[in-house]
Image (tube, rainbow, N blue to C red):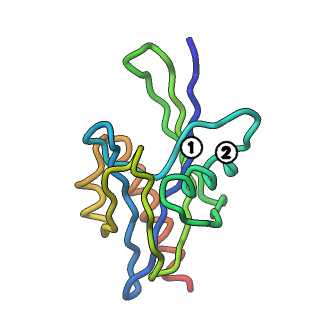
Amino acid sequence: MTTEVASGAVVYRVQNGKPEYLLLKSATSNFWGFPKGHVEGNEKLDETAIREIREETQLHVSLDTSYHDELKYELPNGNHKEVHLFVSEVPADVQIKKQDVEISDFGWFDEDQAVERLTYDNLKQLMKRAHQYISAKIAAN
């Protein structure tokens, strides 16, 4: 069995003291998720996350690696998948330029909207955990 490893981040901006989350829609399906992609070569997880976010959105981000969440599941092809996600705050006025080949749409959503929009339950649960972390971080500032 092959293990596929991907890395990305829950990217957010703060609007009126509350976080809004960036979700991307796949150009090849109705999948809504976070910016992420496969680890290439000897990349570290944080390097992959930064590269994938830049490729998919043109954003140059810094990661908060003190938050790290991981999803593990089996793919229909029999492979095992591991997805590692960090968090990354971007400026409120940041401009997204989506990668048209991979991304058909994107949007900024509050927590409830993001949970509703995300395609899979494991991502919805991860969103709730990340929101707790991010909300506490905003409240502390």
Closest to the observer: 72 or 37? Answer: 37
Closest to the observer: 97 or 127? Answer: 97
Query: What residue is drawn where x is 57% and y is 44%?
Result: 7
Judge from the rendering whether residue 39 lies leftward or rightward of residue 79; answer left or right: right
Q: Residues within 10 Å of mark 1 (few under 14, many from 20)?
A: many
Query: What residue is drawn where x is 50% and y is 65%?
Result: 133
- Quadrant showing the C terminus: bottom right
Query: What residue is drawn where x is 67% and y is 45%?
Result: 45
Give residue 138's position: percent from left, percent from top.
50, 79
Residue kind at label 1, given as amino acid type: His
Judge from the rendering whether residue 109 lies leftward or rightward of residue 41; answer left or right: left
Residue kind at label 2, given as amino acid type: Leu
Judge from the rendering whether residue 101 lies leftward or rightward of residue 31; answer left or right: right
Q: Are marks 2 and 1 in contact (CB under 8 Å)?
A: yes
- Quadrant showing the N terminus: top right
Label 1: element kind: strand
Q: Which residue is mark 1?
A: 84
Give residue 10's position: percent from left, percent from top.
48, 58
Label 2: element kind: helix
Q: Which mark is residue 52?
A: none
Q: Which mark is residue 45?
A: 2
Relative to 51, is 59 above or below?
below
Q: Residues within 10 Å of mark 2 (few under 14, many from 20)?
A: many
Give residue 71's position: percent from left, percent from top.
49, 38
- How many numbered discs, if any? 2
Q: CA distance from mark 2 to mark 1?
A: 7 Å
Residue lying at the far front of the rendered structure: 101
Give residue 102's position: percent from left, percent from top.
41, 44
Query: What residue is drawn where x is 55% and y is 65%?
Result: 59
Relative to 6, is 113 above or below?
below
